[in-house]
Image (cartoon, rainbow, N blue to C red):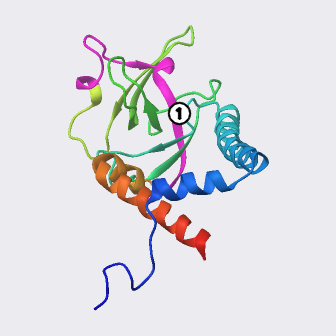
Amino acid sequence: MVRAGAVGTHLPSFGQDVFGDLRKMNKRQVYYQVLNFAMIVSSALMIWKGLIVLTGSESPIVVVLSGSMEPAFHRGDLLFLTNFREDPIRAGEIVVFKVEGRDIPIVHRVIKVHEKDNGDIKFLTKGDNNEIDDRGLYKEGQNWLEKKDVVGRARGFLPYVGMVTIIMNDYPKFKYALLAIMGAYVLLKRES
């Protein structure tokens, strides 16, 4: 008779293994691991801030969350944005804009532009796959967008790369399962 757990690879529980590893390390190794993690996080932040400076956009990379821009962009496409203030906004251009009262930016095409003699520009947007313009999406009483509403202008995209983000937001259990699998993989890799 064989006891359960006696055959095969023994998988230690995650919490016990991490704390056991930490107890086995001397102070220098712990500091090294903490510094390593801090460098990874700070590098990611520096890259993001660098992209913000280079592109002039507060959000240089966004994921398309709906099908309102099909066939130009599909749900899950990753967009690269720039937002140089000196570039004029023109009809036909695809912009990402924020509306007061809404947290999530919208990706739509400029369909009409009104330019005044003093340089003020107002414009109207519409999703390529929508029947009507976006006036229903703007804040109450607002009929036109202004340059201050623009987060960025689409300059390039990678198809469907952002689906990972959408899946993780739509299905939080999938996110935790993926993290658990990655953690188990790291632990198993470390033991071998």
Residue for badge 1: 152
Residue 96 in which image quadrant: top left
Depth check: 121 or 34 in front? 34
Residue found farthest to the left: 131
* Residue 161 appears in view: no
Image location of residue 77, percent across then percent down: 43, 53
* Residue 49 appears in view: yes
| Residue 72 included in the magenta stretch of the image | no
Count the labels in the image: 1
Image location of residue 125, percent across then percent down: 36, 31
Depth check: 123 or 108 in front? 108
Image location of residue 135, percent across then percent down: 27, 23
| Residue 144 included in the magenta stretch of the image | yes
Q: Could you tell me the amino acid type at mark 1? A: Gly
- Write down the region rendered in magenta: 135-160
Residue at 74% from the left image edge and 43% from the top image edge: 31
Relative height, residue 61 to residue 121 (above, below): below
Relative height, residue 78 to residue 131 (above, below): below
Image location of residue 1, percent across then percent down: 28, 92
Identify the image quadrant of the C terminus.
Answer: bottom right
